[in-house]
């Protein structure tokens, strides 16, 4: 059982910007499960996508891997020979725990956990790349450059899975889904204070895009086809395909 997230239950004097530090890493499984509607479905279905997309002698990248939930789901599903999963995160607290999680189970597909900025690592010979709630934490100006590098590093027929919290172009729909997300958090035991303190901390560091913006950016990066394969309220996941060899 993971520790319960009570980080923001008491009033905090000076709310700084959000970071993925030791305290967040300690409660992260509980936090993300109670904060992101559909999270566990997305994690298990990333495994199903891996079954379809991962090819022998290729690499899979899990960018912004946190504690390695997506990596573990992929590793459970991959049956192909000579594959390698590369899991990357720039939070030392996450990486340290991720390595422990990965090493706790034996499996035939090797995993390399790298502490680095995902903007700096080479991406090559990839059959699948996962950005599971990570792109939203990059400065908006850096997002297209990363997606272009992912497209270049993917083999033809490969896939990018991009999960994000969304904003909406229509204000009324946006407000409804935002409120539904708050209802979800309240139903999961978060108080108004916890919800509002976390929201202020995330305000400057997590800038969300609409599905339309994501699709347009993916097209600009080279992905001819992308589609939402999952959505719950203002959270969801897109799959973007690199056209196969003719
Ligand atoms: C919401 S969490 C991702 C959750 C995780 N993918 C999962 O499926 O459980 C975002 C992660 O991205 C990492 N991150 C944010 N910006 C990054 C960057 N520029 N380079 C590497 N990791 C980054 C954070 O440290 C954090 O662990
Ligand atoms: O928007 C929120 O309230 C969130 O908690 C979202 C979110 C995310 O999407 O990554 C933010 C930080 C934590 O990593 C867990 C969830």
Image: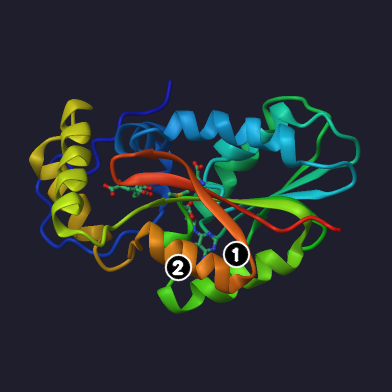
Furthest-top residue in this view? 1
Q: In this rendering, does residue 82 appear at all?
A: yes
Q: Position of residue 4 (x, y in %)?
A: 31, 29
Taking the spot 16% from the left edge, 59% from the top edge, the residue there is 171
Taking the spot 77% from the left edge, 32% from the top edge, the residue there is 78
Give the residue at mark 2.
138
Above or below, comparing residue 141 to residue 237 in the picture? below
How far apart marks 1 and 2 lie (CA) works out to 9 Å
Horizontal side of 114 relative to 29 (left or right) equals right
Q: Is mark 2 within 8 Å of ligand 1?
A: yes
* Callout 1 secondary element: loop
Quadrant placement of the N terminus? top left
Q: Nearer the viewer, residue 49 or 226?
A: 226
Q: Which tag, 1 or 2, sits closer to the chain's start?
A: 1
Quadrant placement of the C terminus? bottom right
Q: Position of residue 70 (x, y in %)?
A: 58, 38
Give the residue at mark 1.
118
Q: Label 1: how many residues lie within 10 Å, few (<14), some (14-19) or many (20+)?
A: many
Q: Position of residue 104 (x, y in %)?
A: 67, 27
Asked if the residues shown at circle 1 and circle 2 are in contact, with their CB atoms under 8 angstroms apart, the answer is yes
Above or below, comparing residue 36 to residue 12 in the picture? above
Q: Position of residue 152 (x, y in %)?
A: 73, 69
Q: Is mark 1 within 8 Å of ligand 1?
A: yes
Taking the spot 12% from the left edge, 36% from the top edge, the residue there is 191
């Amino acid at each position: 059982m993971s520790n319960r997230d009570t980080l923001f239950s008491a009033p905090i004097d000076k709310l700084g910007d959000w970071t993925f530090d030791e305290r967040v890493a300690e409660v992260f499984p509980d936090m993300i499960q109670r904060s992101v509607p559909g999270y566990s479905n997305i994690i298990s279905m990333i495994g199903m996508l891996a079954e379809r997309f991962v090819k022998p002698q290729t690499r899979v990248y899990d960018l912004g891997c946190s504690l390695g939930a997506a990596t573990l789901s992929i590793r459970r599903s991959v049956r192909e020979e000579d594959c390698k999963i590369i899991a990357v995160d720039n939070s030392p607290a996450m990486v340290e725990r991720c390595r422990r999680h990965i090493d706790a189970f034996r499996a035939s597909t090797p995993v390399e956990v790298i502490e680095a900025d995902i903007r700096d690592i080479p991406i090559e010979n990839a059959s699948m790349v996962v950005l599971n709630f990570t792109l939203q934490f990059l400065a908006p100006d850096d997002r297209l450059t990363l997606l272009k590098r992912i497209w270049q590093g993917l083999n033809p027929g490969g896939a990018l899975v991009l999960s994000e919290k969304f904003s909406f172009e229509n204000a009324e729909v946006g407000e409804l889904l935002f409120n539904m997300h708050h209802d979800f958090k309240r139903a999961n035991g978060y108080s108004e204070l916890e919800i509002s303190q976390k929201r202020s901390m995330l305000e400057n560091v997590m800038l969300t895009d609409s599905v339309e913006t994501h699709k347009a950016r993916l097209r600009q990066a080279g992905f001819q086809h992308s589609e939402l394969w999952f959505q719950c309220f203002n959270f969801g996941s897109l799959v973007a395909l690199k056209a196969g060899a003719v």
